[in-house]
Amino acid sequence: MGSSHRPGPRRRGHAGSSSHPSGDRVLVLPGEEIASQGLKPGPGTYRVGGKLYASVLGLVSPQPPFVQVIPLSGRYIPKPNDVVIGTVTDAQGTFWLLDIGAPRWAPLHMTGTPWQVEIGETEKFLRVKESVVVRVENLDATGRIGVTMLGDGLGKLEGGSIFRISPARIPRVVGRGGSMIQTITQRTGAQVAVGQNGRIWVDGDPEAIHRVREALRMISEDGLRSGLTERVDSYLRSTSRSDDEGVQVPPSETAHRDASESHFASTPPSEGGDEPGDQNN
């Protein structure tokens, strides 16, 4: 952004304003000044004349020594080491193309999997519409996204449902120190894999999937307010059965397949239904 840009006016209740409720995330508009407190400009920000401004509508997230603004809408912007959930859109002789919700497809090469794949046999291992958990390995200057399935917690997804939520809400889904996701899995007995691209895979009995879906809806719709973990925990406790809770095991490399997809209010209704199982393959 050039120095000729004229930043928008400061607003009450936004960055740098003492009127913003304690504990809530700071929402900023494009062009709004950010109280940087000596931090450097990160994603979603820019500097003009020694001051930092937001380049997108989103939530201020200090990540010392940087400060960034996490967009409330738009496509997922990948970063190295992000763990994401992708859906196969095409299978070529040596790689698969994955939709990870980014501006470009992400190719997964056969050497980036734990399988011994022969050239031309990719469809024997992954087919179109199947889903995987992968890690963003690298980004080049042209915007090409490199991903890998090699690593703990990565692999093919079987069964379950995939929900979509704004990537900006993922930190609230995880919670501080993993508090929110632990609450959800322990109270429902469901297995959950969270992608930083806003896709969340859930497996379990139908009632457990329904309760996780409702918890995620609460986070999607109420993610800016404080006390969210307590409200989600209260809901899950009020709907629990005696056999719901238990220790959860992360998805293995080959344990899950054919995940269906569902969407929340952050995704246009025309793209899918709200209930698990609406788009079973």
Image (spheres, helix red, strand yellow):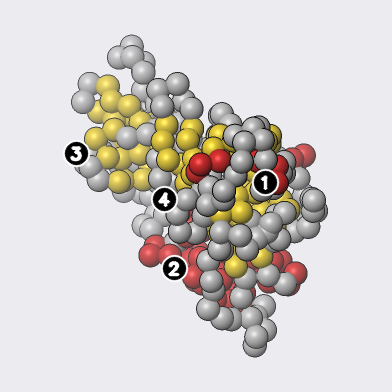
Which numbered disc, 3 or 2, marks the residue closer to the eye?
2
The residue indicated by pointer 4 is 25
Sequence-first disc among 3 and 2: 3
Tell which of 17 and 59 is nearer to you: 59
Callouts 4 and 1 close, C-beta under 8 Å: no
Sequence-first disc among 1 and 3: 3
Specify the label residue 126 is tagged with. 1
Determine the secondary structure under disc 1. Answer: loop
Sequence-first disc among 1 and 2: 1
Callouts 4 and 2 close, C-beta under 8 Å: no
Tell which of 247 and 123 is nearer to you: 123
Q: Which quadrant, please, contains the N terminus?
A: top left
Sequence-first disc among 4 and 1: 4
The residue indicated by pointer 2 is 179
Q: Residue 126: horizontal and vertical position, in percent?
A: 67, 46
Q: Is residue 253 above or below residue 147?
A: below
The residue indicated by pointer 3 is 38
Residue at left offset 28%, top offset 25% = 47
Determine the secondary structure under disc 4. Answer: loop
Left or right of 20? Residue 185 is right
